[in-house]
Image (cartoon, grey):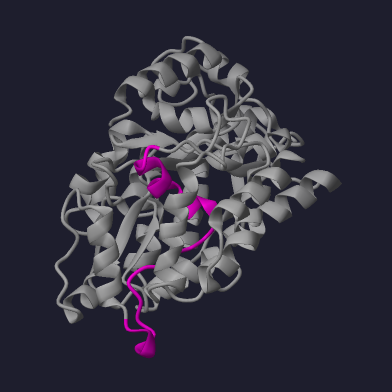
């Protein structure tokens, strides 16, 4: 199963939203600096390492190279802290001028952002240069709220050293879930705190396995959760069995997202699933040989979800015109090529995706290209943050001690639907 046909329909819908646009890669008709008053714009973006901060600082300086009268003041926080911080700033009127947006949070946070449709049209900005899936994810209600900078399918990162130590072959291309499960169990040695996989119970982490099993977790219009779909619970139950039944996953510790990354980074976990955006953080920090693999197939299908992020303009930005120029520079070909080369972004601009492979692990191109063509856009509801929190609350105890996943998913659906 691929999504090429569906992708064609997606791009048609997005182009209808943003109107027919010309082929300029950035706004045209920019005037010389002498025609402008110098302006400083604040830009908020999450980061997880010093190399990542350096990449964003390069991006901020790049804006000034393109538009010398614009200075961008970069500020950062962890990904986990970014969203409550954004909510607080929106409530108090203290939003930065430029704010970053992850696709799955667009339905829930779009009110903090300025719609970009009119700016796309008036500046002849070519949105067709970007992957249509991430354009759709950064849109809501017919409006585009951020220009994409990255995009990519969720894949499996793996620690070659732990595979070698357990005499387990590296994951084969198009491997199966049965083989993945056997490998995770064989590699694990809980007495030495070595585990085959991190069975993170947050919904984002088990969705690729649900999709591969042919299950639907959300309605086609992205408005209603369908966690009680009878195909979902058996997949999630088996996923969590790697922890509570087989001891092939470390006991889950809240907050789960940074914990999963840290366990893999420390060399305690052989496999975990994440996107291409973490290549920069892993390659500069791990002390082992690393590879990436496709999502294990279930019944012959390996289906992932694509995710990504972009840069938008806050609804309280003091100079929207210059803010538009700034985010156009943050996502122009030069910025995309830089972020790709250092491993921070698998570019939203399709033509620049090839630069990511320069700093990736061997074999990455084959895996990324395959998984990108066997993936669906990351569909989320408007209260996705609540859904993530609920899966953490109700599935973490099951991951650690066992329990009825179907009942937990029904409770999560009930609570999330009452928002």
Residue at left offset 65%, top offset 56%: 389
Read off the magenta span: 189-214
Q: Is residue 228 above or below residue 187?
A: above
Given residues 324 and 39, the one toward you in this image is: 324
155 horizontally vs 323: left or right: left
Q: Is residue 311 visible?
A: yes
Dividing the picture into quadrants, the one containing residue 158 is bottom left
Q: Residue 154 in magenta? A: no
Dividing the picture into quadrants, the one containing residue 171 is bottom left
Image location (x, y in percent) of residue 280: 37, 60
Image location (x, y in percent) of residue 136: 50, 27
- Quadrant into which the N terminus falls: top left
Image location (x, y in percent) of residue 14: 49, 19
Image location (x, y in percent) of residue 358: 23, 52
Residue at left offset 52%, top offset 43%: 64
Q: Is residue 20 above or below residue 115?
A: above
Q: Residue 201 in magenta? A: yes
Given residues 304 and 72, the one toward you in this image is: 304
Dividing the picture into quadrants, the one containing residue 334 is top left
Given residues 186 and 157, the one toward you in this image is: 186
Q: Residue furthest right?
A: 92
Given residues 307 and 379, the one toward you in this image is: 379
Q: Is residue 329 above or below residue 273?
A: above
How many numbered marks appear? 0
Q: Residue furthest bottom?
A: 191
Residue at left offset 40%, top offset 34%: 376
- Quadrant into which the C terminus falls: top right
Q: Is residue 77 visible?
A: no
351 horizontally vs 14: left or right: left
Q: Is residue 292 above or below residue 412?
A: below
Residue at left offset 64%, top offset 35%: 107
């Amino acid at each position: 199963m691929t999504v090429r046909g569906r992708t064609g329909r997606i791009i048609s819908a997005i182009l209808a939203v943003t109107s027919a646009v010309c082929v300029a890669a950035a706004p045209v008709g920019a005037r010389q600096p002498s025609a402008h008053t110098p302006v400083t714009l604040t830009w908020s973006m999450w980061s997880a390492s010093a190399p990542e901060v350096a990449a964003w600082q390069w991006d901020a300086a790049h804006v000034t190279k393109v538009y010398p009268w614009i200075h961008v003041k970069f500020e950062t926080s962890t990904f986990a802290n970014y969203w409550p911080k954004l909510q607080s700033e929106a409530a108090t009127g203290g939003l930065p001028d430029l704010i970053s947006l992850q696709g799955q949070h667009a339905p829930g946070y779009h009110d903090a952002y300025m719609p970009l449709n009119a700016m796309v049209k008036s500046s002849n900005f070519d949105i067709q240069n970007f992957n249509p899936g991430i354009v759709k994810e950064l849109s809501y209600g017919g409006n585009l709220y951020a220009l994409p900078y990255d995009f990519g399918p969720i894949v499996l990162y793996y620690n070659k050293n732990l595979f070698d130590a357990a005499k387990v072959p590296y994951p084969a291309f198009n491997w199966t879930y049965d083989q993945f499960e056997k490998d995770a169990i064989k590699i694990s040695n809980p007495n030495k705190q070595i585990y085959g996989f991190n069975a993170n119970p947050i919904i984002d982490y088990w969705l690729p396995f649900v999709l591969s099993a042919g299950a639907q977790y959300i309605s086609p219009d992205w408005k209603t959760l369908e966690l009680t779909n009878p195909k979902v619970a058996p997949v999630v139950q088996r996923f969590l069995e790697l922890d509570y039944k087989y001891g092939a996953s470390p006991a889950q510790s809240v907050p789960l997202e940074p914990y999963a990354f840290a366990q893999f980074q420390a060399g305690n976990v052989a496999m975990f699933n994440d996107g291409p955006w973490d290549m920069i953080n892993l390659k500069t920090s791990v002390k082992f040989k690393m590879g990436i693999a496709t999502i294990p197939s279930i019944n012959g299908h390996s289906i992932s979800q694509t995710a990504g992020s972009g840069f938008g303009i806050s609804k309280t930005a003091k100079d929207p015109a210059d803010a538009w120029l700034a985010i156009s520079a943050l996502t122009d070909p030069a910025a995309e090529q830089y972020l790709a080369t250092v491993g921070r972004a698998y570019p939203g601009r399709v033509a620049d995706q090839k630069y990511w492979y320069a700093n990736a692990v061997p074999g990455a191109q084959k895996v990324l290209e395959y998984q990108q063509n066997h993936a669906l856009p990351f569909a989320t509801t408007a209260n996705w943050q609540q859904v993530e929190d609920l899966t953490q609350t109700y599935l973490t105890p099951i991951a650690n001690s066992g329990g009825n996943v179907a009942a937990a998913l029904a409770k999560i659906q009930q609570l999330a639907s009452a928002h």
